[in-house]
Image (cartoon, grey):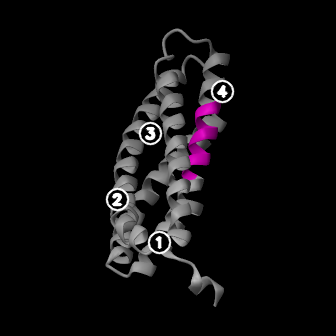
Amino acid sequence: MLENCHSAKERWGGVSELIDRWLKERQELIVQYCDLSGAEADASAEELKQKFNRLCEVLLDYVSAGHFEIYEQLVREAKEFDDGGIEMAARVYPRIQKTTEMALAFNDRLEASALTDAERPALFDSLSKLGESLETRFEMEDFLIEHLHNVHADQVMDSA
């Protein structure tokens, strides 16, 4: 009953803050990705291993936050507003899941790799493919944020 007394702003205002923090994590992921992709030629094996490990830490944190925090909130908001968002999410989430699987496979491959000189080209090829996958993921996530959250911003403010 108390939950019904909350305004839309109280219910959904925190979602914007959560999304903002998540987008900052995305920015950190991009920084780590660019730092690593620029280090291919001149970095030592140990330096590369550290950069790959840091990238994977940020990558897994970002992907996990998306699945276990952001998407859950976006779906909850879509249900609340009941304006077709659930169906849209159902079409987009499987495509995002494919990028998640690629990120997890990249992490697993790195854990199994010794990062020898012979492995470098293959790892950087995988890194390039990961970058393409992340670009697609970011576009889909931005689409969901725009259509499941930002579209309701005026309604949330009006009910405050």
Provide the residue designation for mark 4.
114
Provide the residue designation for mark 2.
146
Residue in view at x 49 percent, y 57 percent: 16
Disc 1 secondary structure class: loop
Which amino acid, mark 4? Ala
Picture quadrant of residue 58 = top right
Distance Cα–Cα, label 1 vs label 2: 21 Å
Of pointers 1 and 3, the one earlier in the residue sequence: 3
Residue 111 visible here:
yes
Which is nearer the eye, 70 or 14? 14
Of pointers 1 and 2, the one earlier in the residue sequence: 2
Which amino acid, mark 3? Leu
Which amino acid, mark 1? Ala
Provide the residue designation for mark 1.
160
Q: Going by the image, does 21 lie left or right of 92?
A: right
In the rendering, at what x and y percent does residue 97 appear?
A: 46, 59
Disc nearest the viewer among 2 and 3: 2
